[in-house]
Amino acid sequence: MFQSEQKEAEELIHHYLEENGIPIPEAFQWGNVPFKGEWGISTSFFETAALEARSGKQINVPERAQEIAQDVSARLEKHRSFSRVEAVKGYLNLYFATGEFSRKVIAQVLEQRRDFGKGDPKGERVMVEFSQPNTHKAFHVGHLRSAILGDSICRIMDFAGYEVVRANYFGDIGLHVIKWLWNYMKYHAGEEPPQDTTRWMGDIYAEANQRLEENPDLESEVRELYARWDARDPEIVDLWQNTRQWSLDGFEDMYDTLNIHFDHLYANSQAEKPGQEMVKELIEEGIAEDLRPEDAVIVRIDELLGLEKEQYRVLVVLRSDGTALYATEDLALAKMKFTDYDLNKSIYVVDVRQQLHFQQVWKTLEIAGYEWAKRCEHLSYELVNLPGNVVMASRDGTVVLLEDLIREATARALEVVEEKNPSLRKQEKQNVAKTVGLGAIKYPLLARDNTKIVTFDWEKALDFNGQAAPYIQYAHVRANSILRRAWGLLPKAVTPPHELEPAEINLIERISQLPDDVGRAAEERKTLHITNTAYELARAFNKFYKQCPVLDAPPRVRKFRISLVVAARQAIANTLNLLGIEAPPVM
Ligand code: ARG
């Protein structure tokens, strides 16, 4: 946040060290002084003192660090950027004048607007694969967490300065698809999907499972069909292509509703053949063992690594009949990603239950000599439980579909909006309800640590007074309504003419932290840092709103506070945007 002041201080430090023949460390680490009514930055001289000690001098490092801190602080005493400087136990603390700091924070937001909080370009390209629904099945809330989490991670990493490639990976082939085709050909031939395509696709799949369960003898027909697919029988390929498209069109509608978009679409089917080729190479290199025709092709990973303790176990890379497995395709997919894009990192947002699978696949690739395999990363997430603890499974058709969830969220949000703001026009109420409903679905999935189960709770998700999307959206609406009434007053960052109220200081403090929060969320791949920031910003704003009159304040105070409202609104909008949640203009 205070790069220029930091740089000035650092130059001065360099000067001092040079003059005194003290070795200069490669870089100084700067941090924020924990806020106690005063803002400041700090660094330490332990590394400097340690370098000096290493150069042969007899030195007590902590004492020497404090000595340097004292000398430097004496030099910085009169520097105009700092209201106070301090040398404590080897640390140098530089404090800002409160009014000046406030003006600078607001000035930065007003200047950067939508870009406030953005990190410097990192020159690193990262692919994030997320959502990954399966065609010929329903798009249910099980895949929703991946979609919402992945989208937000992309937004955060992009904002933090990474070049992000958003990828999807459709499960468009495999046993589930063949079962679907079998059921369709035998019992639904010629049927076209109704408007509710995705649900219908899911129903046919569920029905297939039911039939096979009732009559296991039919399995042989499914196997036969699989063989026809594997031989690329044109009739089957044709049907597969058409029906697959039905699913993809249905997904596209979902993504539009959710405001989620992709740069690159991969599909399992596309990785099948290249995967089989790679397995051939693995066999030739002696990495995979070919146990066909009796058994499958396997990689004994632990054995290859000489591990005594079981860790990676054995990965099956090809069926005994030569057909591709999920793992076969993932071998090829990983390679495709690095060939298509020169990636620094390849992140997979996938359910925690697939952890071993990915470790096996990537370790196998590493053994095969692909150096990029180490740059694959699993961002795992836990299940979502719906009220009544309905666990998602598409096999038996007892799933809650995304559409159901959105419909329910919107209906509930509409009730709240009707109560809160009965004078809105009907269409407007509908729009607001949709925005609030979607926010209510997204926020809890992002606010919960990805490694923990989310139990979805309508009351909590739609709480206007708690840690929930509507509360944050409502703060944004409040800021809007003040600014609408303040029109004509061009917001400009000014030094506050008054002694700041605690609520003002707190709000400014929150705003100033946004850039750091973004960096941290990106590095840790944790959306919850941003959901927290959004909530804390809204809370700080609401407190300010209740305690500090804006439009009725004396003119110069009013001017300052209006600029603070603009900055707060922007900070809230920017965090909501990182979460993929819209800010409605009214509520
Ligand atoms: N479609 C798979 C599923 O529904 C998830 C795919 C995850 N990505 C991958 N590269 N294997 O479980």
Image (cartoon, rainbow, N blue to C red):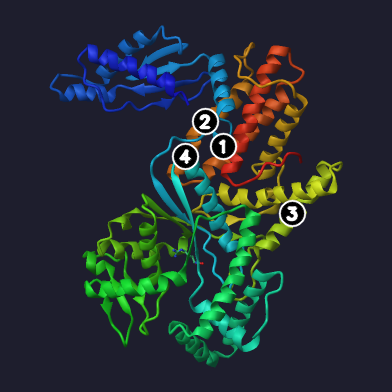
Instruction: Name the residue beneath numbered marker 3.
Output: 410
The residue lying at 61 percent from left, 41 percent from top is: 576
| Helix, strand or loop status at disc 1 | helix
Task: Specify the farthest residue to the right.
Answer: 423
Question: Which comes sooner in the sequence, label 4 or label 2?
Answer: 4
- Residue 464 placed where, x, y %? 72, 42
Q: Earlier in the sequence, mark 2 or mark 3?
A: 3
Q: Please give the name of the residue rendered at 31% of the width and 75% of the height, measured from the top-left corner.
A: 298
Kindly identify the amino acid type of the residue bearing the numbered disc 3: Thr
Looking at the rendered structure, the kind of residue marked 1 is Thr
- Looking at the image, residue 243 lies above or below residue 441: below
Q: Nearer the viewer, mark 4 or mark 1?
A: 4
Q: Nearer the viewer, mark 3 or mark 4?
A: 4
Q: CA distance from mark 4 to mark 1?
A: 15 Å
Quickly name the residue at label 4.
160
Mark 1–mark 3 CB contact (< 8 Å): no
Secondary structure, mark 2, is helix
The quadrant of the image that shows the C terminus is top right
**Residue hosting label 1:** 533
Q: Are marks 2 and 1 in contact (CB under 8 Å)?
A: yes
Q: Amino acid at mark 2?
A: Gln
Tell me the crowding category of disc 4: few under 14, some 14 to 19, or many 20 or more residues within 10 angstroms, Cα based.
many
- Distance from the alpha carbon under mark 2 to that under mark 1: 8 Å
Which is nearer the eye, 392 or 264? 264
| Badge nearest the viewer, 4 or 2 | 4
Q: Earlier in the sequence, mark 2 or mark 1?
A: 2
In space, the residues marked 2 and 3 are separated at their CA atoms by 33 Å
In front of the other: 216 or 406: 406
